[in-house]
Image (cartoon, grey):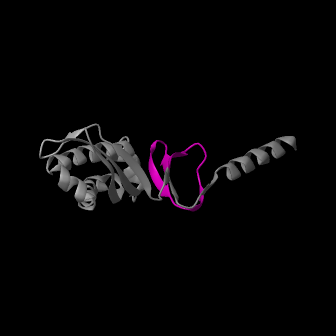
């Protein structure tokens, strides 16, 4: 009798321990035996004991990446430091998880490079007076590059432009 009770208790623990609740605005990436199995969206899901593993919990809300540039040279030879912020959201949890090793850091790095190139193609006064245009250019450049990582760029804004 006690063996049956212990077995029943173990089975109940496995069943209820395998029920997972994904909170709103999150997607969980699940692997089964080490391979991608599914992207679980908001709701209740069942994980097969010993086979399924949640490898990443992704916030699908808008996020931001702050960009702090060391220095760049404008078209007219001025040395500037530009701080920017990039707003993005995850559109594909599988690509975000497996497409590139550190996606948020990669967005920052790509934004830094693009901002350096944009600043180098403009004169200082134009760079300062056309912040929205520069932000739109940065949004376009990033948007075309990061889609394959499961990321959508919402917008980019210049926060600070200082001369050195």
Q: Quadrant of residue 102?
A: top left
Q: Residue at x 46, y 42 (%)?
A: 34
On screen, residue 74 above or below 143: above
Quadrant where the C terminus sits is top left
* Most common secondary structure along the magenta stretch: strand
Quadrant where the N terminus sits is top right
Q: Quadrant of residue 6?
A: top right
Q: Residue at x 36, y 51 (%)?
A: 85
Q: Is residue 32 left or right of residue 69?
A: right
On screen, residue 42 above or below 124: below
Pinpoint residue 29: horizontal percent, then vertical percent.
Answer: 48, 51
Magenta stretch contains residue 51: yes
Q: Is residue 57 left or right of residue 93?
A: right
Pinpoint residue 99: horizontal percent, then vertical percent.
Answer: 34, 47
Q: Residue at x 26, y 61 (%)?
A: 136
Q: Is residue 117 left or right of residue 7?
A: left
Q: Is residue 77 left or right of residue 131?
A: left
Count all numbered tags in the image, as a single digit: 0
Pinpoint residue 31: horizontal percent, then vertical percent.
Answer: 48, 47
Magenta stretch contains residue 148: no
The one nearer the camera, 75 or 109, is: 75
The one nearer the camera, 117 or 31, is: 117
Pinpoint residue 121: horizontal percent, then vertical percent.
Answer: 14, 50
Stretch in magenta: 30-57
**Is residue 137 in view from this perspective?**
no
Q: Residue furthest right?
A: 1
**Is residue 19 in view from this perspective?**
yes
The one nearer the camera, 58 or 80, is: 80
């Amino acid at each position: 009798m006690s063996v049956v009770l212990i077995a029943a208790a173990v089975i109940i623990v496995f069943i209820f321990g395998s029920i997972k609740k994904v909170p709103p605005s999150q997607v969980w990436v699940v692997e089964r035996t080490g391979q991608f199995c599914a992207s679980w969206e908001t709701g209740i899901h069942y994980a097969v004991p010993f086979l399924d593993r949640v490898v990443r919990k992704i916030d699908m809300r808008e996020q931001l990446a702050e960009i702090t540039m060391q220095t760049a040279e404008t078209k007219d030879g001025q040395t500037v430091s530009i701080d920017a912020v990039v707003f993005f959201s995850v559109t594909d949890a599988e690509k975000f998880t497996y497409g590139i090793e550190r996606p948020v850091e990669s967005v920052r790095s790509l934004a830094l490079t693009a901002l350096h190139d944009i600043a180098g193609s403009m004169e200082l006064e134009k760079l300062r007076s056309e912040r929205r245009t520069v932000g739109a250019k940065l949004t376009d450049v990033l948007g075309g590059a990061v889609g394959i990582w499961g990321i959508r760029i919402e917008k980019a804004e210049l926060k600070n432009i200082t001369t050195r």
